Image: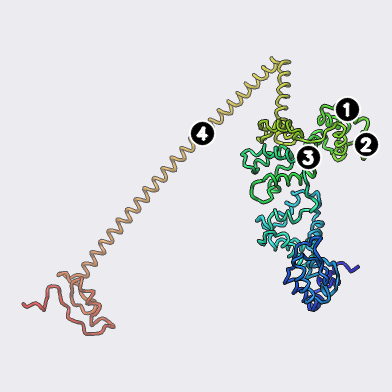
Amino acid sequence: MPPRGWKPCPHCKQVFSPSSMKAHVNRCSQREEVKAEHELRELEGFLRPPPLPDWPQCPNCGEQYGQTAIDPHVKRCRRLRPHGANGFFSPGAEACQGLWGVGDVSDLIRQLREKLGIAEDTGMDVVRALFEQWDENGDGKISKAEMTAVLQTLMPEFTPEQIDALFDAADEDHNQAIDYKEFLDFLADPNSAKQLPRTDIEALRALFNRFDTDVDGFLELGEFRTLMKNMIPTRAGDFDVADVDSSGLISFDEFVKYWSSVVGKAGFRAGELDEVADMFLRFDRDDSGELEREEFVTLLDNIFPDHCEQNREIMDAEYVNCDADLNDGVSFHEFLAYYDRLRHWYGKTGGWPPDDVEERMETLSKDFVKSYCGLDFLPDRLHVHQRSCEECKRAIAEAEEARRKAREEAMAAAAAAEEARRQAEEEARKRWEEEEAARLAEEEARKAAEEEARRKAREEAEARRRAREEADERRRRAEEEARRRAEAAARAKAAEDLDENGFKRCRFCSRTFFPERLPRHESICPKKPGTIHGCRPTVTPVEDLSRPT
C-alpha cells in the first residue's frame, strides 16, 4: 500500500509522491499513446453520456458506443491507438477511464455524495444548506471558482480536470453557474426517488388546494408557511428548500417532491410525530429528557384519549420492554419505538389529514381560525400548534394565571371583605396623602425654579440690552470721529493742491493744469525722472487751434 499522500498518475495510474508527480506526469504525457488518446478525446469529447446496456464495444479499446457512432470510432481508435486504450488493450474499460484525471464522472459524483453524507433518505433541507455553504458570495448560484475551492478542500484527491468535469455535469444549462435546482439534481441519490401512493397524492393535492388561498396553482411564502405551521411546525421556514427553481412560488410538483423528502416515507407521520414530540416535552416537567412511569401514562392518555384503560394495562405489562436501557425512565427514542407498537395495537395507520376522502374534505373545508400568535389554522390543528408555539403557550399561561388569581382574590375577598375594604381605604388615604404632599412639594419646587429662571432671563436680557446700547454708542462715536477726520483731511488736501484759480501744479515742472488734465501731463512730463523728452503741447479745453479766430 503506497504511503499516505501519494497519488496516481492520471495517465498510467502508477502512484508517485507529491515531489515526483509533476516530473513524471510531464514525461508520461509525452508518450505517443497518451497524445493519441488526447487527440481522440478532442474529436469525440471528453464527457460522453453513460452507455446503454445494448451498445456494442469497440474491439480495440473496449468502450461502448451507439450504433451510429461505433464504426467511426473504431476507425479513429485503431488509427490513433494501435495498442488499445491508453497504450494498453483492456476490453470493457470504462469511458474516459484514466484520461487526464477525469475518469468515470458518475463514480466521481458517487464519491462526492459519500463524502458529503448524501444518502437515500437525505432531505432537501440538507442539500439546501450545502448549496448556501458553497455559494460563498450569496448570489444564489455556485460559480466554477466557488465549486473548485470547495472540492479542493473537500476532495483533495480530485484532479483539476475531474473538478471541471463535475462542474460541467452539474451545470445542465451550460451557463457557467449552478443554480439550486441543478445542484439538487446533481447531488440527489439516484435511489432516493419516492413514489407516493395515489391516495397520498390525492391527500396532498387537497391539502395544497386548501392553503392556496388565491387559487393560482402555487403556494406563496405566506401560504406555504401557514400550511407547514398546520402540518409540520418545525419546517415552516423551509420555503427556500421547497422552491427548487427559485421562482418565489412553489408548484404542486415541487411541494410533492419536498414533502417526500422531509417526511422520509409515504403518509403524514411527520406532522403527527411533531405533535407527539411537543407532548413529550410538555409532560417532561423536570426537563430531564425522560418520563417517569406516571408521566408516561399521562402522556399516552393525552395521545390516545379513547384507550386510557388499555394504556395503563399495556404500560404495566410491558414497561420493562419500553424502558430499553432499564434506567426506570423512558427517553424520547424509547418512546418512539413503543409508540409504533401502540399504533399497531390500536389499529391507527394514518396521520392527519384523515385517510378517508369524505372525512378529509370535511376537515379541510372548515374556516381558518386565528391563534394567539396571529397565524391561521384549521380548527383540528389549532391545539397542536398552541402546544408548540411559545407565544401561544405564553398567552394561554397568562390567561390561566389571570383566572387563577381572580379565583384566589374572590375567595380572599369573601373571607375578609370588611378588612380588605378598610385596609384598601387606609392604604388609599396614605397613598393620597403621600402623593398630595409629593405633588405640592413638586409644585413649589417647579414654581421656584420657574421664578428663578424668569429672573435670570430678565437680568440676562437687560445685560444684553445695555451691552448692545454701549456698543452702538461706541460705534456711533467712532464713525462720527472718523467722518470728521476724513472731511478735515479732504479739505486740507484740496486746499493744498489747488491755487486760487482752481488749478493744480505738476509735481515735476510746477506748471498749472486743470485737475482732470494733470494726470495725463504728469505721465509724460519731461522733468519726470526716467521720462523720454518731447511732450506734445498741452491743449486746454478752451483752446481750439484748428478753428479760425
Q: Give the Cα separation between the discs numbered 4 and 3.
A: 79 Å
Q: At label 4, which amino acid type do we have?
A: Ala
User: Which image quadrant: the N terminus?
Assistant: bottom right
Residue identifier under label 4: 448
Relative to residue 384, is residue 427 drawn left or right?
left
Q: In this view, does 377 lie above or below 104?
A: above
For the image shown, how many numbered marks are present on the structure? 4
Quarter residue 91 falls in: bottom right
Residue identifier under label 2: 321
**SS at mark 1?**
helix
Neighbours of disc 4 within 10 Å: few (<14), some (14-19), many (20+): few
Q: At label 2, which amino acid type do we have?
A: Asn
**SS at mark 4?**
helix
Residue identifier under label 1: 310
Q: Of residues 393 and 149, which is closer to you in this image? A: 149
Q: Give the Cα separation between the discs numbered 1 and 3.
A: 26 Å
**Which numbered disc, 3 or 2, marks the residue that appears first in the sequence?**
3
